[in-house]
């Protein structure tokens, strides 16, 4: 099913702009991406078969990969076959590309990727060809002109089967795109926020089947709140909120925004004017944002309903022991959960605003990784061709190895969870307030709502608007100056 969703994903190219209007994404778009292969004389030609021929003369293709997010899977290189399917698929992918283009792929891991890129570019040294780093760590370096403009490289197709269309749309500013997510690195899946639920508590409390709620498009914020209130209880009977009680939700401090994103709202929207120019709009004081934030805060700020593990670290294990109905964390945490949880749990997309929304949206962490090409690269078309081949191979084999085997095979215990994972990863939203963290919107938003709910959002908008406009305009101007 995932393969079909990805094949149809060109419809999502307009998803980010559609979300700004609160509309349902188009169900179908007539595109070449909907035809997974061409045929010649009745023979199927796969995307791998269709890769152009080239001989790059033994060129050493150097990858630099950030490892700050070391609890997530990073799939850039593998030294040998070891029987583990992701490792072995990465190994075989890189050997395929080496043989296809007569290159030698090498990699280097670092926790200091952007300073290393900047140093290399400033020295005029082409030390790295492909670099992977967390999105929110790349923005400043991109604005300062240290990356190649990806959509000016003809050998990169941006076919949505291989290159994530949500990120391509989100990070393309006035036709300039300097970093993007794609299938080369499964970190792009791992960074998707997810909602988990305790099957034990659903059964014990006699609550509605969350899977059926999702399918019938009745999985909404109101329904989530209703179920949370049914679950919350002073289980240990001591009259004090503490470990051993049962809660509606356990999560980290950053997941307020995941629930907001699920309703189709974003703190910052990118808009294209009648002149075709992009701009950014601060969206803290719109009627819907205030309403949605208020609903989310009523749930997460109520200490009888929710545990924020940053404030109550004892709550971290509440979900694992079936003392919380819901749990929100990145998809990359699912393996850790399986290791720590004895009973069954399920995975869900985030709830909709109401039953009329018609689609599920899921926020991407700004610490998810994206790819860039340093400005000092001398042959961008060579680097683009190798990157394209890696992405095409990854779509054919690595995505299945990760998604079908790691998630569906080893982790998911039923076909319902498989279906929910397909929905969860289909429409990924990048909110500029977290990706462009130097604008300082999300931090102030979160500080305000955790203390005051939605009451002060209009005044917060007024306080931030001048500095926001200045920062956003500086970003747009910086991109326009890059050659």
Image: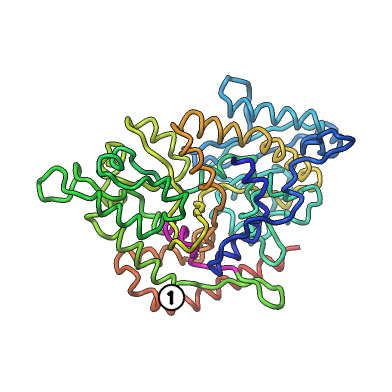
Looking at the picture, does residue 406 appear above or below residue 119? above
Query: Which residue occupies the extreme right position in the image?
Result: 41
Image spot of residue 365 (x, y percent): 49, 51
**Which residue was labeled with disc 1?**
287
Image spot of residue 461 (x, y percent): 44, 76
Nearer to us in this view, 309 or 480: 309
Give the magenta part as a residue range: 257-270
Residue at position x 81%, y 41% from top? 38
Residue at position x 58%, y 39% from top? 186
The magenta stretch spans residue 71 = no
The magenta stretch spans residue 260 = yes
- Viewed as shown, does residue 448 lie left or right of 49? left
Few, some or many residues within 10 Å of mark 1 (<14, 14–19, 20+) = few
Looking at the picture, does residue 17 appear above or below residue 469? above
The scheme the figure's colours follow is rainbow
Image spot of residue 111 (x, y percent): 53, 42
Circle 1: element type: helix
């Amino acid at each position: 099913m995932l393969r079909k969703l990805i094949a149809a994903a060109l419809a999502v190219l307009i998803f980010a702009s559609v979300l700004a209007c609160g509309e349902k994404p188009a169900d179908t778009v007539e595109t070449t991406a909907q035809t997974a292969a061409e045929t010649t004389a009745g023979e199927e030609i796969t995307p791998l078969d269709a890769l152009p021929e080239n001989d790059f003369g033994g060129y050493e293709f150097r990858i630099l990969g950030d490892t700050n997010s070391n609890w997530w899977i990073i799939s850039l290189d593998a030294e040998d076959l070891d029987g583990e399917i992701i490792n072995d698929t990465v190994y075989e992918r890189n050997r395929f590309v080496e043989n296809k283009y007569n290159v030698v792929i090498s990699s280097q891991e670092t926790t200091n990727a952007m300073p290393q890129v900047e140093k290399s570019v400033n020295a005029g040294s082409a030390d790295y060809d492909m670099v992977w780093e967390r999105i929110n760590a790349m923005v400043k370096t991109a604005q300062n002109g240290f990356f190649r403009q990806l959509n000016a490289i003809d050998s990169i197709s941006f076919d949505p089967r291989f290159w994530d269309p949500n990120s391509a749309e989100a990070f393309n500013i006035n036709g300039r795109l300097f970093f993007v997510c794609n299938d080369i690195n499964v970190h792009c899946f791992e960074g998707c926020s997810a909602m988990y639920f305790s099957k034990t508590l659903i059964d014990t409390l006699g609550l509605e089947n969350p899977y059926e709620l999702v399918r019938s498009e009745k999985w909404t914020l109101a329904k989530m709140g209703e179920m949370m209130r049914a679950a919350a209880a002073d289980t240990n009977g001591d009259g004090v909120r503490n470990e051993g009680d049962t809660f509606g939700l356990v999560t980290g401090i950053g997941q307020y925004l995941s629930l907001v994103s699920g309703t189709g709202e974003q703190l910052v929207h990118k808009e294209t004017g009648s002149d075709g120019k992009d701009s950014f709009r601060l969206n803290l004081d719109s009627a819907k944002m205030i309403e949605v934030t208020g609903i989310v805060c009523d749930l997460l700020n109520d200490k009888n309903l929710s545990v924020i593990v940053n404030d109550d670290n004892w709550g971290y294990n509440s979900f694992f022991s079936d003392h919380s109905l819901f749990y929100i964390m990145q998809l990359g945490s699912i393996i850790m959960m399986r290791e720590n949880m004895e009973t069954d749990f399920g995975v869900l997309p985030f709830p909709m605003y109401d039953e009329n929304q018609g689609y599920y949206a899921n926020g991407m962490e700004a610490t998810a990784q994206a790819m860039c090409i340093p400005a000092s690269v001398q042959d961008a078309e060579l680097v683009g061709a190798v990157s394209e081949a890696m992405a095409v191979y990854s779509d054919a084999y690595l995505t299945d190895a990760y998604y079908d085997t790691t998630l569906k095979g080893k982790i998911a215990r039923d076909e319902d969870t498989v279906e929910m994972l397909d929905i969860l990863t289909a429409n990924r939203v990048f909110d500029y307030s977290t990706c462009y963290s130097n604008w300082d919107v999300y931090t102030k938003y979160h500080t305000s709502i955790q203390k005051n709910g939605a009451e002060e959002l209009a005044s917060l908008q007024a306080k931030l608007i001048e500095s926001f406009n200045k920062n956003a305009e500086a970003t747009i101007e910086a991109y326009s100056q890059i050659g």
